[in-house]
């Protein structure tokens, strides 16, 4: 790194305390308009920065990295995911990549649990009826949903967030099942009363609610394809607060419209910010604008992690949240 204060370019507006601290520590350039960078503007930033701070919606591919300037040595991403950056190419060009894991766990698990509760109980339909002024009054048969307690919850990805979801779900009386690349520790299974399924297919055929909590990697792209979705019960519900690319969104949409799945709660989408128009307006689907981590506390803590990663790197040490080849 240069002896002078490093040039840090931030692609979106961040919470005010984060921006203020960055200005104290670095020569920082903030995106005052908060408009997403075009490809041309991103290329310009990569060419001028010592350190780039992108977000999870900034796609930094091989072509853009080829335009990086000689001084760019760190991409300190603001977000827990890193699938938006071609990490392998960055590392080959001697550019480190960091992320902000851990701080979003509880917030995302809260939102996941909210969707697990809301979809079976038809909260969206009830809210629409009230907001449209169509409520005729209480009726024994009106808007009957399904009880959540006692149902089988399948968690796809038992990492930090999946485990936090399981803790919450156990408190609501759900039976915990999970599929993961590696089985979690026996003490964790015992505490959660969780059942591990080595076969994702077998788990999908038996659960009532699926919570998607795995990252998007080449190995998880369309992990939930049409074949696997068809293994699920027609009474099952799918909740996704992880990454939209894990699910074949077209297949999911077809099944929801055909009544082959009972409902879905989606906070992420395959082609964000675009949403499959055939999902819009479905009464059995609750759609949220990628807000699982949207708490003041969480977003400030994300920024603090970015600052720590940058400061540690500038001081000549390995950043604590470096993305390693083994993580890809």
Image (tube, rainbow, N blue to C red):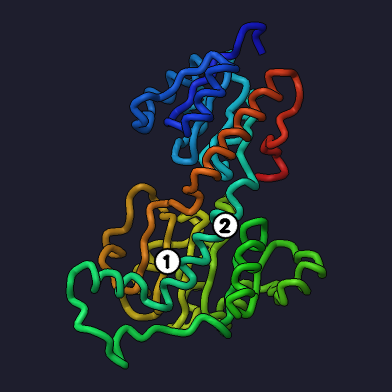
Between residue 106 and residue 130, name the one nearer to us. 130
Q: Quick check: 52 above or below 197? A: above
Helix, strand or loop at label 1? It is: strand
Residue 167: x %, y % from top left: 65, 68
Q: Looking at the rendering, which quadrant does residue 32 occupy?
A: top left
Q: Position of residue 249 (x, y in %)?
A: 40, 62
Q: Secondary structure at mark 2?
A: loop
Looking at the rendered image, the quarter that the N terminus falls into is top right
**Residue 225 appears in view:** no
Residue identified by numbered label 1: 265
Q: Is residue 234 above or below residue 59?
A: below
Q: Residues within 10 Å of mark 1 (few under 14, many from 20)?
A: many
Say which label, 2 or 1, has the lower sequence index.
2
Marks 2 and 1, how far apart at CA:
19 Å
Q: Is residue 51 above or below residue 178?
A: above
Q: Which residue is mark 2?
A: 220
Q: Nearer the viewer, mark 2 or mark 1?
A: 1
Q: Residue at x 70, y 39 (%)?
A: 325
Question: Whole-percent x and y of residue 192?
Answer: 71, 72
Seen in the picture, residue 142 relative to 91 is either above or below; the reply is below
Q: Residue at x 48, y 62 (%)?
A: 240
**Position of 198 compared to 269: left or right?**
right
Residue 82: horizontal and vertical position, in percent?
57, 41
User: Which image quarter holds the C terminus?
Assistant: top right
């Amino acid at each position: 790194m240069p002896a002078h204060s490093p040039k840090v370019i931030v692609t979106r507006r961040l919470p005010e305390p984060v921006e203020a601290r960055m200005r104290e520590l670095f020569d920082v350039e903030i995106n005052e308009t908060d408009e997403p960078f075009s490809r041309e503007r991103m290329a310009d930033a990569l060419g001028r920065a010592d350190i780039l701070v992108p977000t999870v919606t900034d796609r930094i591919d091989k072509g853009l990295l080829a335009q990086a300037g000689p001084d760019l040595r760190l991409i300190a991403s603001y977000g827990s995911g890193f699938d938006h950056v071609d990490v392998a190419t960055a590392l080959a060009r001697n550019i480190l990549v960091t992320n902000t894991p851990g701080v979003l766990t509880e917030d995302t698990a809260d939102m996941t649990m909210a969707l697990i509760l809301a979809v079976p109980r038809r909260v969206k339909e009830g809210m629409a009826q009230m907001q449209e002024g169509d409520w005729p009054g209480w009726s024994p048969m009106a808007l009957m949903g399904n009880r959540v307690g006692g149902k089988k919850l399948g968690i796809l990805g038992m990492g930090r967030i999946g485990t936090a979801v399981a803790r919450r779900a156990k408190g609501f009386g759900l039976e915990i099942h999970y599929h993961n690349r590696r089985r979690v520790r026996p003490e964790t299974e015992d505490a959660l009363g969780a059942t591990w399924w080595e076969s994702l297919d077998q788990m999908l055929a038996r659960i009532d609610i699926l919570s998607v909590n795995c990252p998007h990697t080449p190995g998880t792209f369309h992990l939930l394809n049409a074949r696997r979705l068809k293994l699920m019960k027609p009474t099952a519900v799918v909740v996704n607060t992880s990454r939209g690319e894990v699910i074949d969104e077209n297949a999911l949409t077809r099944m929801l419209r055909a009544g082959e799945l009972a409902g879905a709660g989606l906070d992420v989408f395959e082609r964000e910010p675009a949403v499959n128009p055939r999902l819009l307006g479905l009464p059995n689907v609750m759609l949220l604008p990628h807000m699982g981590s949207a708490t003041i506390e969480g977003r400030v803590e994300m920024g603090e992690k970015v600052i720590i990663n940058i400061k540690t790197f500038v001081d000549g040490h390995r950043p604590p949240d470096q993305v390693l080849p083994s993580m890809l």
